[in-house]
Amino acid sequence: MKKQAKSKLHNRLKRVEGQVRGLQKMVDEEKYCIDIITQSSAIRSALSVVEDLMLENHLSEHVIHQMKHGEEKKAVAEIIKVFKKSKKK
């Protein structure tokens, strides 16, 4: 994984971690339901960015390597699998 991508992912995951802690606190304190749902939605969005960064890294490193080394079927199968999972959200 490229150093810059790893740094971005680490920072994003730390942010998500803080958001989840905040969400737990909101539930413990019985905050307004809509506020909890709003925070939950923000966490989902932040995790979506993590997925996007990981996919970008995978495409730019692993898929290129697979294509150059005769593993086209494996590369295509992995991407299709991820794409299908993302559609089920």
Image (cartoon, rainbow, N blue to C red):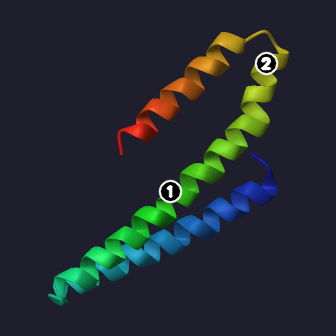
Task: Give the residue drawn at x 73%, y 28%.
Answer: 63
Secondary structure state at the residue bearing disc 2: helix
Other-residue count near label 1 (Cα within 10 Å), few / some / many at <14 / 14–19 / ≥20: few
Name the residue nearer the viewer: 57 or 3: 57
Instruction: Give the residue type at disc 1.
Output: Ser
Q: Where does the image place residue 89, in percent across and percent down from the top left? A: 36, 45
Task: Give the residue drawn at x 36%, y 69%.
Answer: 41
Residue identified by numbered label 1 = 48
Residue identified by numbered label 2 = 67
Q: Where does the image place residue 76, in percent across and percent down from the top left? A: 63, 19
Task: Give the residue drawn at x 35%, y 82%.
Answer: 22
- Determine whether 19 is above or below 6 in the image: below
Instruction: Give the residue type at disc 2.
Output: Met
Name the residue nearer the viewer: 11 or 33: 33
Secondary structure state at the residue bearing disc 1: helix
- Determine whether 63 is above or below 27 in the image: above
| Label 1 to label 2: alpha-carbon separation | 26 Å
Q: Is tag 1's residue or tag 2's residue first in the polypeptide sequence?
A: 1
Q: Where does the image place residue 17, in percent across and percent down from the top left? A: 45, 71
- In the picture, measured across the screen, residue 57 lies left or right of residue 64, that is left
Q: Where does the image place residue 49, in percent across and percent down from the top left? A: 57, 59
